[in-house]
Amino acid sequence: MSQITEVQGNKLSGVFQHPAVLGALQQRLNGLVGKPSSYIADLPADVKRRVDALRNFQDKHSELEAKFREEVLALEKKYLTQHQPLYDQRAKIVSGDVEPTDAEAHREPEEDDDEEEEKVRLTFNRGVVYPGLPTFFILFRTLIMSNRKNQKTASKPSDKATKGIPEFWLTALKTNSAISEFITERDEEALKALVNIKYAYLPDNPGFKLEFFFSENEFFSNTKLEKTYFLINSPDTSYGDVVYDHAEGTKIEWKEDKDLSVTVEVKTQRHKTTNKTRTVKKTVPAPTFFSFFNPPKPPTEDDEDVDEDIDSKLEMDYEIGELIKEKIIPHAVDWFTGKALQYEDDDEYDEFDEDEFDGGDDEDDDDEEGGAGADGEKPAECKQQ
Amino acid sequence: MSQITEVQGNKLSGVFQHPAVLGALQQRLNGLVGKPSSYIADLPADVKRRVDALRNFQDKHSELEAKFREEVLALEKKYLTQHQPLYDQRAKIVSGDVEPTDAEAHREPEEDDDEEEEKVRLTFNRGVVYPGLPTFFILFRTLIMSNRKNQKTASKPSDKATKGIPEFWLTALKTNSAISEFITERDEEALKALVNIKYAYLPDNPGFKLEFFFSENEFFSNTKLEKTYFLINSPDTSYGDVVYDHAEGTKIEWKEDKDLSVTVEVKTQRHKTTNKTRTVKKTVPAPTFFSFFNPPKPPTEDDEDVDEDIDSKLEMDYEIGELIKEKIIPHAVDWFTGKALQYEDDDEYDEFDEDEFDGGDDEDDDDEEGGAGADGEKPAECKQQ
């Protein structure tokens, strides 16, 4: 009799989810909040004594929690070894090294995601379709899907020429809106050579490593680019947690004039007295997905000039890595087909520029249908700005 | 050499984290997004065949994921049985039924959260203190702590009279800003009688139950109020997840004129012809924390009038329940002392009314110090409004 509704969240990890780099903020607060210790110190002595006992119990609790996290990590490692054969089969089919057997490729029609099945699921969910539709979301998702479709149709090769599943990982990554923001047009050419992404846990650290495998391409000579996230146990044992330490990435061996992390400006200069001309090349940093392999460095205590945005840069860098590990790799085919969009939460749309749809015009507020989706997302927070 | 930064997230659950009730949105989208199936149908036949094979692998992957979630839930249950003796000891000390032994109450001074220790931790974290302090957060947290302190000092009883730890759970709940929004002044009197909160897993359902225990009080006759969240496995096996089904709460047996969910307006009326007067009582619904035990109902397919906000109400109801299970119960003493505020992410401040601090005045933008904390939270999202 009740509607079935989705419980969000990454499904694989209970330990490293939804990270944020709050260390600096916490440290700033540590010395400045209203001194909980004096609040406690003002309690009657016998009450203070009882609170101290509870704090000791809490320390024991934290030790148990640390063991729990270790057991969850062990479970994650165990399941990765079970998932890996499926990932390996997938990689061979994507690259075209192996053709699926008829049994492997056979799919019952009723299992397919065609429109009929959507209707069946709608009924099964016993849900309600409201008259006021969130046009913003529908527009956005429709645009994504139609863009993908047009692109695919335009480059559609003849059946004979197609090896494996072309642009499988590029398409999967671009379907995730958080990741697609980092992929430039120039990046797309290079990411067509991306033939697999794997992740692995580290032997001596609770972090993880991402491995991007590339076929030969005109941009760089590396066949594998790695990104490793190192985590450590929190130094505060009484509210223990696993915390971010730092990340490392492979140095990319760019081929000549193919470095996607810069653009080259060529200028012709004429010497004032000799009147000779010469060309001057100036390299300017350019945004690229491949800066993912050159992660931001957490500030050290010796740093004089600290990037004001370093916290959010570190947080974003970790979130993209976790997203690839938790969502893209485990469900890559659903990102390729677009099915994953139906199950995603809306957090990934946070950064999306709404102006492209509603012109950022506040006068449009009476257009209730058009504004409902965007405005409804985080009403309390944004309306107070 | 690197700064230690906090990785956010609930630590105990890998399965039911950060829930949101998106069913209705998904259903609205299911019939309306740009038909991924036709995008796939347009692929060359041999590529389509390979994609079908990957979809079959994905189905096998989903079966493994379901087993993983079951194992994590089993782990959570196992650890709850290990945590429970600590929770039970805590409850006896909070109620005053048991005094801690000297060994239990003994705390090394260096373990305490006094200012000295904060400085040590600051050094150990090797962090950087920026000159631009997030005044908004500091103000807010300082206000919370000083309010708590004043309140405590005002009602400070003599040592002899104090039994257990008075207002332990009320203080812990109020320290969490998301929960404190639901606690009215009238609620506080009733919540002083709250002597324990427990959670338990359900025998035949992946959900959980919260149990609130009350000492005798003037408001209601129940000694235990329960709130149970029922979850079910997603009907879509190929992107399986655990989803919210519905919640149930204990009916509160309010004592006469003590129902906190209503306010009573008394009016005197005079009969026009007889000139006699009578008093009329009118009950008006009032906001109260105790509406937590009367949860919103998910709409059924037969519902004609669906509450427009039902999705966010269901989501909020689930989030409060999960917050109590994942954060308040496991670390209650840290919420009581305020220590938990130092480790919390900032999500809980989303709903906070910033106008109380900056007057909502856009002209204050040049006051960089005052605006940094609030503006920095979700910059991309809010600046586009």
Image: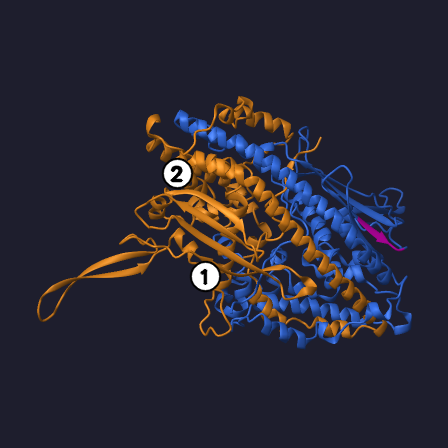
Chain colours: A blue, B orange
The answer to whether residue B375 is above or below residue A366 is above
Identify the residue position indicated by label 2 in the image: B167
Does residue B196 appear left or right of residue B190 in this picture? right
Chain part drawn in magenta? A211-215
- Which one is nearer the viewer's eye here, A90 or A286? A90
Distance from label 1 to label 2 (Cα)? Answer: 28 Å
| Residue positioned most to the top | B109
Identify the residue position indicated by label 1 in the image: B296
SS for callout 1 = loop
Q: Are marks 1 and 2 in contact (CB under 8 Å)?
A: no
The answer to whether residue B132 is above or below residue A337 is above
Instruction: Report x, y in % for residue A344.
Output: 64, 60
Instruction: Report x, y in % for residue A30.
Output: 54, 32
Tell me which chain the residue with mark 1 is part of.
Answer: B
Q: How crowded is mark 1: few (under 14 residues within 10 Å), some or many (20 or more)?
A: some
Q: Which amino acid does label 2 sit on?
A: Glu
Q: Residue A331 carries which label?
A: none
| Residue positioned most to the left | B274
Residue at 51 percent across and 46 percent down: it is B365
Q: What residue type is labelled 1?
A: Pro
Secondary structure that dominates the magenta span: strand
SS for callout 2 = loop
